[in-house]
Image (cartoon, rainbow, N blue to C red):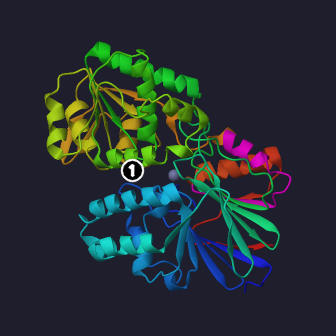
Amino acid sequence: MVNDKNLKITFCSGAGTVTGANFLLEGNDKKFLIDCGLIQGEKIADDLNWEKFPYDASLIDILFITHSHIDHIGRIPKLISEGFKGRIVSTMPTKEIADVMLVDTAHLLSREEHYDLASIYTPANIEKALDLWETLEYGQKLNVDHGFQFSFKDAGHILGSGMLEIIYNGKKIVFTGDLGNSPSPLLPDTEVIDDADYMIMESCYGDRNHEEREERKKKLEEVIKNNYENKGTLIIPTFSLERTQELLYEMNSLVENNIVPRMPVFLDSPLSIKLTKVYLKYGRYFNIKALSIIATGDKLFDFPGLKETPTTEDSKAILDVPPPKIIIAGSGMSNGGRILHHEKNYLPGKNNTILLTGYQSVGTLGRFIYDGVKKVHIMGEEVNIRAQMAIISGYSGHKDSDHLIEFVENTANTLKKVFVVMGEPKSSMFLAQKLNDSLGIDAYVPTVGESVIIKC
Ligand SMILES: [Zn+2]
């Protein structure tokens, strides 16, 4: 049993896989959850999501949310339906983005006929979650009885993202959530941590490095110029949250400085349109460069040629617009959303280009395209891929292998152990090995369902 000095961490999900973050921290008669995400693979929500949680949801004191990606928040309505009545705590932008994301996910999942999702993913359960939800500024401390103190540091991953720091019995435990690929065009850099005793860290890119950022903007410029010369359609399946705003921000700079020729650019995603509004509202969380551009009166996410297409009719009308043109649409891994229609229409054309800007999970259509498959099935139709493919991996929202190690190195002197989670097994294993070899850190890759005791 757990005694006063020890804490127990259970990796309920989000170990040995990138998605589904859900960690249980117990000690001194308290129970906390860190994130409550959807497990996502081929489908927006894997069947595993709908099994009962391995803990009694009604006994959880607080659920902390590191950030509002759906693989960190997507099972909150289920937690509510299993009787959760504790507090939910995050930063302010995380709460507001979560509201938009959960409503959107409810809309997608309501089409699923299994697992009685219509009674789990209800507006009432989402509403109830928002009522229980409190917010903290970065650095603001939350003291909880039985000797716990919590606060968030900026993770620089998406707007509002935070690393959760827990102080208990003089020891510091850090749940990193996802760690940003700093420097980000919009967000401040990931804050330094140099005094952690234990760390539970992500490893999405634990075994790979990204292209340099300069190459990234240059490559976007080239892809846009090529598409103009080819008189093609450039389709960009993209994540509505953060990636879309980064792209708009960089396109804003390329177009307004006349670096690329002007052509119609369609933001064909109701979700992206809604989230971009939240970004505009919380501009005060941006980095100094972005703040200085805002101060000149420039609208960061708007430029000549950009058109939002919120309705289905607007979206269908894009087909009638002659190329060259650019279409930004969700979802980022092509596993749903309006991008599927555009992929069906434009992937067969050899003058067209598909630009992949993010991680493509195993089993998704995006991953098949990324792997160079020449024939795919989209909405029941066989589609030949003749379009050119461009990949800009520098757009990743995650730190790459070298930067994850650099991040841990800052606190190498105080660390007792690192638990490497939220990565595919080979990524997590590689990172753990590297932390061990190059920094001499005790790094461990837990399996799903495993519990560990840490001494405080
Ligand atoms: Zn994330």
Image coordinates of residue 264 in percent, x first then y, are: 26, 25
Q: Amino acid at mark 1?
A: Gly
Identify the residue at horizontal 59%, vertical 38% (top origin).
Answer: 287
Q: Nearer the viewer, residue 276 or 364?
A: 276
Above-or-below relation of 297 to 85? above
Instruction: Residue lying at the far top in this picture: please name it.
Output: 229
Image coordinates of residue 164 in percent, x first then y, are: 65, 61
Q: Is residue 348 magenta?
A: no
In this rendering, position of residue 160 left or right of residue 322? right
Q: Look at the numbered disc 1 and give the secondary structure of its residue.
A: loop
Instruction: Residue lying at the far right in this picture: please name it.
Output: 413
Figure disc tally: 1
Determine if the C-beta at disc 1 is less than 8 A from ligand 1.
Answer: no
Give the residue pinned by disc 1: 363
Above-or-below relation of 36 to 138? below
Image coordinates of residue 292 in percent, x first then y, are: 56, 31
In the image, the segment drawn in magenta is 403-422
